[in-house]
Image (cartoon, rainbow, N blue to C red):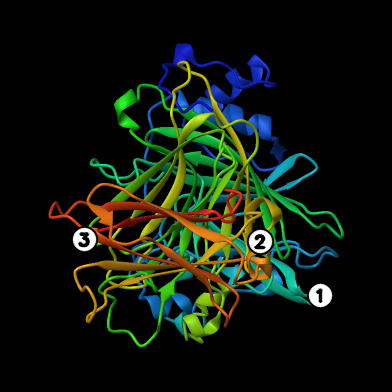
Amino acid sequence: MPALHAGGTRNHRKPRGIPVFIVLIFASVFARAAGAPADDAFSFDLLQARALALASAPCEQSAPRVPENLSRLTYDEYRLITFNLARALWAREAQPFRAEFFHPGFLQTQTARINAVEQGRARAIPFSPQLFDYHELADSIDTSAFPADMGFTGFRLLYPLNAKNQLDELIAFQGASYFRALSKNARYGLSARGLAINTAGDGGEEFPAFEEFWLEHPAAGATSMRLWALLNGPSVTGAYQFVITPGADTVVDVAAVIYRRAGVPDEKIKTLGIAPLTSMFWFGGNSQGRPDDLRPAVHDSDGLAIHTGAGEWLWRPLDNPRAMQVMSFVDNRPRGFGLLQRIRDFAAYQDIEAAYHLRPSVWVEPVGDWGRGAVRLVELPTPAETNDNIVAFWSPATLPSAGEPLRIAYRLHWFTTDAPSVAAPPKGIVVETRQGRSLTNEPDLRRFWVDFGGDALAKLSDNERVEPVVSIGGGAELAHAASVEKNPFNNTWRAAFAIKPDDSGRPVEMRCFLKNGKNEALTETWSYLWNP
């Protein structure tokens, strides 16, 4: 799969399936990033042409449209502003989806235009104070001073996800290109993004934003919802299509066409992140120097899972490092990756309000050949659970010819306990990682317990021939032969080993999996980085 490449206006080629005259019309009409006229024709092809036209000119920063009195609102004041459910889009229709819009204020000051699409025609939805209830703020906020073109900071879709006659929040888009979804019985946790640029780079990260959305009118009894978004930023533009199908595995099908902005040099985009996921890991069972918190663990995700193009399954436990860590898992034609929350027992977190045991996992399923590249994992240090400090994305290895669009498609699976088949290794999985020292026996060694579980492993008797395979990278050596035994209390299998660090202070890469007497792998591969 190619990445993006710079190209001047003369080198741009029309997207496949879009007539040249349409591209020229959009180039002249939309080069100034003007909003689409109300009740005008709309299609994904036209949106691609618009993104191409925007890419042919320098990025223009629009003037702020949110009044200062809204940006000065405190968090608690902003929460007082609520959407009037009776005014939701499609509220009076016999179909299960509803759309509510987010009011600008507090930190949410980046607005977007929103349109409704019916039978191929787009109708602009203007901001109106009549859509909201201001409660205690009604006398202190002059709504008549709001600009007519202020727009919304995003929207959320509602759907009867958990009960037939009850509307639940299904997916929300707000802030840059961020969005997050829910599956049945889940609580909001990690987020997805349309695109990541220069994440963890020296020059700072770029955050292109969804500037405009189009929500398609759902049919009666619809089980899926389609919408589109226009991405715009200093280095790129893009046209996105989303098809959201709610359920125990809520699936978001994403199709995107991305263009490099004219005149942007190659070195401007050092890292391009496809299908980026953003999560939080403060501490868990594998953490060193855990905070003085009464909860046993606090995280939205506990590991990165990868299904490589060669068919290997990898599990990388997440960490809250002392300094930023960036890992690359090189691959060709990846089959999938995701940030998962595998530990689902409430007792592991003991948090009734946050309910970390109900945070969704997200699996990225590529559609088509993504070619060569790497799954990148960025782990940032965080002092608290309020900061997202984990990012995972696919970074393509090659650049396309100048002016060529980057076309990408993938499915995002949001789920809790029952993983879809594409995200479920057919063999044993890592269910827990623990590390520490023995203060009374060889305290200079670092000890690890890796617990593997799954139905197939649970059925093996404790006298079966099961062997651990452990490999240790530079910076340490295996102190003793690794051991494995079946845990009679929960039917998992525990691999135990100890390493002896050298004096270099280097991070130590380790891998571990279980095999049987026929030299066949029984589990996925545990991959871990230990920092002295």
Q: Amino acid at mark 1?
A: Lys
Q: Which residue in the protein does label 2 denote? A: 419
Residue positioned 23% across, 42% down in the render:
202
Above or below for 347 versus 111: below
Q: Which residue in the protein does label 3 denote? A: 532
Discs 1/3, front = 3
Above or below for 529 versus 270: below
Q: CA distance from mark 1 to mark 3?
A: 53 Å
Q: Quadrant of residue 247?
A: bottom right
Residue positioned 25% across, 58% down in the render:
531
Q: What residue occupies the far left of the structure in this picture?
A: 503
Q: Is residue 174 visible?
A: no
Q: Which mark is residue 164?
A: 1
Q: Amino acid at mark 3?
A: Pro
- Dot 2 or dot 1: first in sequence order is 1
Image check: 140 left or right of 431? left
Which quadrant would the C terminus be assigned to in this image?
Answer: bottom left
Q: CA distance from mark 3 to mark 2?
A: 34 Å
Secondary structure, mark 2, is loop
Q: Nearer the viewer, residue 381 or 41?
A: 381
Q: Quadrant of residue 424?
A: bottom right
Image check: 499 left or right of 358? left
- Dot 3 or dot 2: first in sequence order is 2
Q: Position of residue 28 (x, y in %)?
A: 53, 22
Which quadrant would the N terminus be assigned to in this image?
Answer: top right
Residue positioned 55% across, 15% down in the render:
13
Q: Is residue 277 visible?
A: yes
